[in-house]
Amino acid sequence: MSLHGAGNPVGLPALDTTWGDKTFQLHQAGRYDLDVTPSSPGCRLSALPGVGDATLPFTVQQTGDSSAFSAPSHVEVQVKDFNGSETCELVLRDVASGENVDFVTATHNAPTVTLDPGGRSQVYLAANDCAVRIGAAG
């Protein structure tokens, strides 16, 4: 996938090679031209409207960003599949700004972690390569 335009929009990591389903939240208004380079049969790129509105608890099986959700006082994330990694880096972001609100590393020995949304009303779990279940802690 390649991006044409001024800079990398907030929320879209630099991607050299992307395989499988990925979802990313973008936090800058404007026009972005995304394409698949080189063109590959079966490879598809599409834009989804809005930030999403998931109801807790829910599972994210694709890699990348989760849908947005109303933030409880603390968010519990349980890694269901590390996809071959030893750890899973988890970042909670504010929907409105894309700002990192909290972060933690999950491991095989501690696959369930808690994140603090810091009073934000809507958040999402930023790009990661693990399949996770997101819910309210407590």
Image: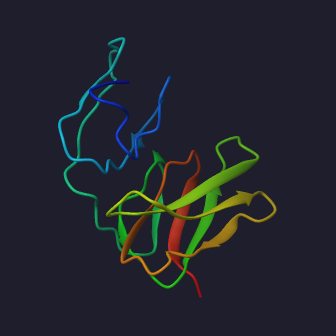
Q: Name the residue at the top extreme.
A: 38
Q: Position of residue 121 (x, y in %)?
A: 36, 78
In what quadrant of the picture does the C terminus appear? bottom right
Q: Position of residue 68 (x, y in %)?
A: 35, 64
Q: Residue at x 76, y 46 (%)?
A: 86
Q: Name the residue at the front extreme.
A: 6
Q: Residue at x 41, y 76 (%)?
A: 120
How many labels were placed on the picture?
0
In what quadrant of the picture does the N terminus appear? top left
Side of 51 where 89 appears, left or right: right
Q: Position of residue 93 (x, y in %)?
A: 46, 62
Q: 110 or 96, which lies in front?
A: 96
Quarter-of-image position of residue 132: bottom right
Q: Name the residue at the right extreme.
A: 109
Q: Position of residue 51 (x, y in %)?
A: 28, 58
Q: Is residue 109 above or below residue 25?
A: below
Display coloring: rainbow
Side of 87 where 124 appears, left or right: left
Q: 110 or 120, which lies in front?
A: 120
Q: Residue at x 27, y 47 (%)?
A: 28
Q: Is residue 37 above or below residue 48?
A: above
Side of 42 where 115 appears, left or right: right
Q: Residue at x 40, y 40 (%)?
A: 12
